[in-house]
Amino acid sequence: MSAPLLNPRPSTLGRDAFVSHYGEVYEHSPWIAESAWDAGLDTEQDTAEGLATALAAVLDAAPAERQLAVIRAHPDLAGKAAERGELTADSSREQAGAGLDQCRPEEYARFHRYNASYQQRFGFPFVMAVTGSDRQRILAAFERRLEHTPEQERRTAIGEVNRIARLRLEARAGS
C-alpha cells in the first residue's frame, strides 16, 4: 500500500502556492518551505514522509542561529499565549489534544515555573511534539531536559520541531 498523497501535491505547486499551503508547518518559519521549494521538489515530496524529510533537511542544515530562531517561534506549553488564545490553529489543537487546556491551577503553576526555568537556562522555549502525550509525560520531559547542556537541548529541540512538522503533514495527508 502506498503512502497517502498530500493535497495539494507539493510537486505540482508554484513557489507562492507551496509556501501558502506548507509554509506554516514550521511555526512562523516559512523560509524553510521557501528553501525546500528552491532546492527542487519532485513526486517523492508529495507524501507526508517525503516532504517532512525535505523540510527537515533544510532546518538541519541551517546555521545554529537560524535554528534557534525557529525554536523561539514556538509558544510555551500551557503558557500565556495559550491562555490569551494567541496560538496558531495547529499549536492550539496539539496542546488541547495533550490536555494542556485543562490543567488544574497547580499544574498551570508548575508549567509556568518550568517554562521560566527552561527559558532562563537555554534562552528559548521548551519544544516538544505533544501529540499523543499527556500533561504528566510533558512535565517529566521538562524535568529530564532541564539537565541537558545547551547544545544537547538545541539538538533535542530541533528534533522535536521536525517531529511536529512531520505530524502536521501526516494529519494533512490523513495518514
Image (cartoon, rainbow, N blue to C red):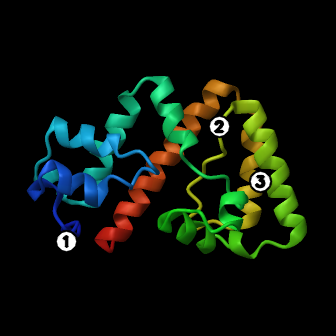
Q: Which one is in front, 109 or 150?
A: 109
The mark nearer the N terminus, 2 or 1, is 1
* Above or below, comparing residue 75 to residue 2 in the picture: above
Q: Which kind of residue does numbered mark 3 sit on?
A: Ala
Q: Nearer the viewer, mark 2 or mark 1?
A: 2
- Judged from the image, the secondary structure of the residue bearing numbered disc 3 is helix
Residue labelled with disc 1: 1
Q: Nearer the viewer, residue 128 or 64?
A: 64
Question: As shown in the figure, which amino acid type bears the numbered disc 1?
Answer: Met
Q: Residue at x 82, y 63 (%)?
A: 108
Dot 1 surroundings within 10 Å: few (below 14), some, or many (20 or more)? few
Under circle 1, the secondary element is loop
- Reading the image, the residue beneath label 2 is 124
Q: Position of residue 94 (x, y in %)?
A: 55, 67
Within-10-Å neighbours for mark 3: few <14, some 14–19, many 20+: few
Q: Earlier in the sequence, mark 3 or mark 1?
A: 1
Q: Residue 144, can we see it?
A: yes
User: Which of marks 2 and 3 precedes in the sequence?
Assistant: 2
Tell me which amino acid carries mark 2. Answer: Phe
Which type of secondary structure does the marked residue at label 2 adopt? loop
Q: Which residue is mark 3?
A: 140
- Which quadrant is home to the C terminus? bottom left
10 left or right of 171 in image: left
Q: Position of residue 165 (x, y in %)?
A: 42, 54
Q: Looking at the picture, how far across and down is residue 83, in whole percent?
A: 71, 66
Residue 168 shown left or right of residue 108 in the figure: left
Q: CA distance from mark 2 to mark 1?
A: 41 Å
